[in-house]
Image (spheres, rainbow, N blue to C red):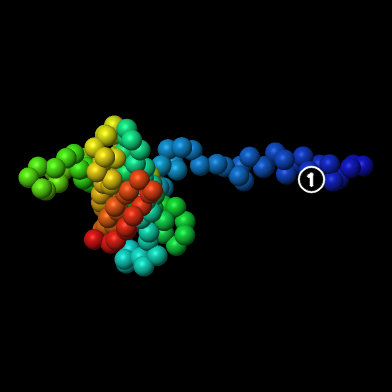
Amino acid sequence: MKHPGFLLAAICCAMLPLAFHAETWFQEAKRIRQEADATEARSKKFEILPDCELTEKSVKAGATFKDKGERVIVRRAVIHVELPVGREKGSVVYKYRDRKVNYNGEPAWTGRWREPWAMGSFTYTVRATYKGNVYVRQFKVGRNGVLTSSPK
C-alpha cells in the first residue's frame, strides 16, 4: 500500500457517525423533564427574572429562570396577574388572571387591557417548582418597566 494514511482516514470517516450520535428531539425532551423532576437542596443561585411589558393596549407578564447563571426549565410555573380595572368608593378593583404551565423556561401571560395603563401599573406573581423546591417572586410593573421586585 502506497497510502496508509488514506486507509486510516477512510476507516475513521466511516466510524465517525457512530461516535457522534446526536440526541433526538424526544431524547432531549425526556432528559429535560428528568432534570426538572430531579430533587435537590434549595439553590441559592436560582433566579426568577421578569419578562414584562405594559403598553396602552396590552399587558405581558412573564418570566425566565436561571440557576447558577444558566437558563433552566422548571417543572411547574404559575403566573398570577392582578390587573387594576378601576376604582369604586375610593378603593382599587382588580381582575385576576392565571397561567399555569409545565416543563417551561419562559412562561408568559398576555392580554389586551387598557385599564392598567390608565392606573399606571399592575402586579404579578411567579411561582416556580424547580428540583423539588418552590420559589416565588412578585413584580410590580409600571409604564417604565419593573418598579419593584420582591421575594414573596
* 73 relative to 39, above or below: above
The type of residue carrying mark 1 is: Leu
Q: Quadrant of residue 17?
A: top right
Q: Quadrant of the C terminus?
A: bottom left
At a point 18% along the width and 39% down the height, the residue shown is 85
Q: Residue furthest left?
A: 89
The quarter of the rendered structure image containing the N terminus is top right
- Mark 1 — residue? 8
Residue drawn at (32%, 43%) of the image: 61
Give the camera-side residue of 80 and 34.
Answer: 80
Residue plotted at (24% across, 37% down):
115
Residue 43 place in picture, x, y as percent = 35, 65
- As drawn, the residue found furthest toward the right would be 2
**Viewer-proximal residue among 31 and 152:** 152
Tell me if residue 87 comes above or below residue 47 in the rendering: above
Give the SS element for disc 1.
Answer: helix
- Asked whether residue 130 appears in the rendered view, the answer is no
